[in-house]
Image (tube, rainbow, N blue to C red):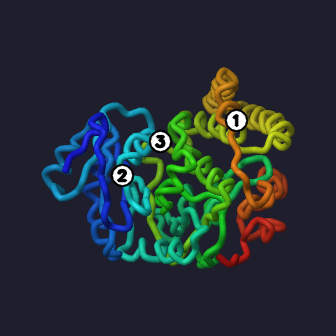
């Protein structure tokens, strides 16, 4: 069935899981990867494709080839976040499995995630181990084996630090508590998603899942990676990795995320240091001949400061069991120092990584 968000539809999912796949001009990916989603062995799911105002023949393809799939159409594309912001309020389910169109899923991907959620009522979200679609023995940039955050708010992963991606040799096959789950594919409790406000539409794209997961953490829920579940992600299908647009959103959105979520006492000293580190990064890019990256960084900072009151007004705090630095998945050192100064390239080499939640934790 075809639904239009402008009509305020209500999609009541009787199944336990609503698999919500976001698509934008993704006809080729849908043709390639939709059959894998439909072969999911877990019996209690319903697939819903959100067509985020595609201008290709996605709509005609879905109507002709998959008339049994529910499609939610959004009239105007206002970014990756908007696709979920507009559609999820109309989809009533117990769990959302959110994924992008460029993910290949083995038949048994969903069951381990559901088992983990059902076993731990305080588990708010979880992700599979995410590997590269084109290099299948390597982790994928956007999520790898679980997301972490350093003391200055820089995100990294088990299996990926900055642009250095590790091969998967089984070194991160333990399910552990993490700080953030990848937006490429993850499972979340639907009630929790709505209770904490869902995705923030001001992010447009990039780091919106980290912001969401930070709010999950502040609501005293856990997030885990479940490596028994595996996904293969193409990545960079909407905004290319390394593009100026991605550089811009990464800088701007990280500052917004810190402003929204850090305790004020931490924000007052971390934000100035982050601004300094960003300026150093921009200068290095300029000296290396990447003037576009430096320009994107400066534009990101300009746009952040033009709306700083707006970001401050987004701050709200629920009681949390632990201060943010003691949350699992927060690395209490500088990942910039470890990577660029000390030359540490892999997650397992990081000193004191045990304090960041690498050890197994009981539900």
- 296 relative position to 113: left or right: right
Q: Position of residue 323 (x, y in %)?
A: 80, 55
- 324 relative position to 224: left or right: right
Q: Is residue 291 visible?
A: no
Tell me the residue at 35%/43% (across/down).
24
Say few, some or many: other residues with alpha carbon within 10 Å of mark 3 (under 14 / 14 to 19 / 20 or more): many
**Distance from label 3 to label 2 (Cα)?**
16 Å
Return the residue at label 2: 91
Tell me the residue at 64%/65% (across/down).
222
Q: Nearer the viewer, residue 309 or 208?
A: 309
**Distance from label 2 to label 1 (Cα)?**
44 Å
**Distance from label 1 to label 3 (Cα)?**
29 Å
Return the residue at label 1: 285
> Contact, CB < 8 Å: mark 3 with mark 2?
no
Q: Quadrant of the C terminus?
A: bottom right
Vertical order, 24 against 305 (above or below): below
Q: Position of residue 82 (x, y in %)?
A: 44, 39
Q: Secondary structure at mark 2?
A: strand
Which is nearer the N-term, disc 2 or disc 1? Answer: 2
Q: Position of residue 359 (x, y in %)?
A: 73, 75
Return the residue at label 3: 81
Tell me the residue at 59%/46% (across/down).
207
Vertical order, 229 against 34 (above or below): below
> Contact, CB < 8 Å: mark 2 with mark 1?
no
Q: Nearer the viewer, mark 3 or mark 2?
A: 2
Tell me the residue at 31%/75% (across/down).
43
Q: Nearer the viewer, mark 1 or mark 3?
A: 3
Q: Position of residue 6 (x, y in %)?
A: 30, 34
User: Going by the picture, which residue comes out furthest to the left?
Assistant: 64
């Amino acid at each position: 069935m075809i639904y239009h968000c402008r009509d305020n539809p209500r999609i009541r999912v009787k199944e336990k899981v609503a698999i919500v796949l976001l698509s934008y001009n993704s006809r080729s990916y849908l043709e390639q990867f939709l059959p894998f989603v439909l072969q999911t062995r877990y019996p209690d799911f319903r697939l819903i494709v959100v067509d985020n105002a595609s201008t290709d023949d996605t709509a005609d393809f879905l109507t002709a080839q998959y008339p049994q799939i529910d499609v939610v159409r959004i009239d105007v594309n206002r970014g990756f976040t908007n696709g979920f912001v507009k559609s999820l309020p109309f989809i009533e389910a117990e769990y959302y499995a959110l994924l992008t169109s460029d993910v290949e899923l083995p038949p048994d991907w969903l069951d381990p995630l559901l088992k983990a959620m059902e076993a731990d009522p305080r588990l708010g979200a979880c992700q599979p181990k995410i590997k590269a679609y084109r290099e299948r023995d390597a982790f994928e940039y956007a999520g790898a084996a679980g997301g972490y955050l350093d003391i200055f708010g820089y995100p990294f992963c088990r299996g990926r630090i900055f642009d250095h991606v590790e091969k998967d040799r089984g070194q991160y096959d333990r399910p552990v508590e993490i700080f953030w789950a990848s937006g490429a594919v993850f499972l979340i409790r639907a009630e929790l998603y709505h209770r904490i406000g869902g995705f923030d539409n001001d992010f447009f794209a990039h780091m919106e899942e980290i912001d969401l997961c930070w709010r999950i953490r502040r609501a005293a829920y856990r997030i885990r990676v479940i490596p028994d579940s595996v996904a293969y992600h193409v990545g960079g299908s909407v905004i290319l990795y390394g593009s100026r647009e991605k550089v811009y959103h990464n800088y701007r959105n990280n500052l917004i995320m810190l402003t929204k979520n850090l305790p004020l006492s931490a924000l007052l000293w971390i934000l100035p240091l982050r601004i300094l580190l960003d300026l150093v990064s921009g200068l290095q890019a300029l000296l290396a001949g990447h003037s576009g990256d430096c320009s994107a960084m400066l534009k990101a900072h300009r746009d952040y400061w033009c709306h700083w009151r707006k970001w401050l007004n987004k701050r709200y705090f629920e009681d949390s069991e632990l201060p943010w630095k003691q949350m699992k998945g927060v690395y209490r050192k500088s990942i910039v120092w470890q990577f660029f100064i000390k030359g540490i390239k892999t997650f397992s080499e990081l000193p004191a990584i045990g304090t960041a939640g690498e050890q197994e934790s009981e539900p």
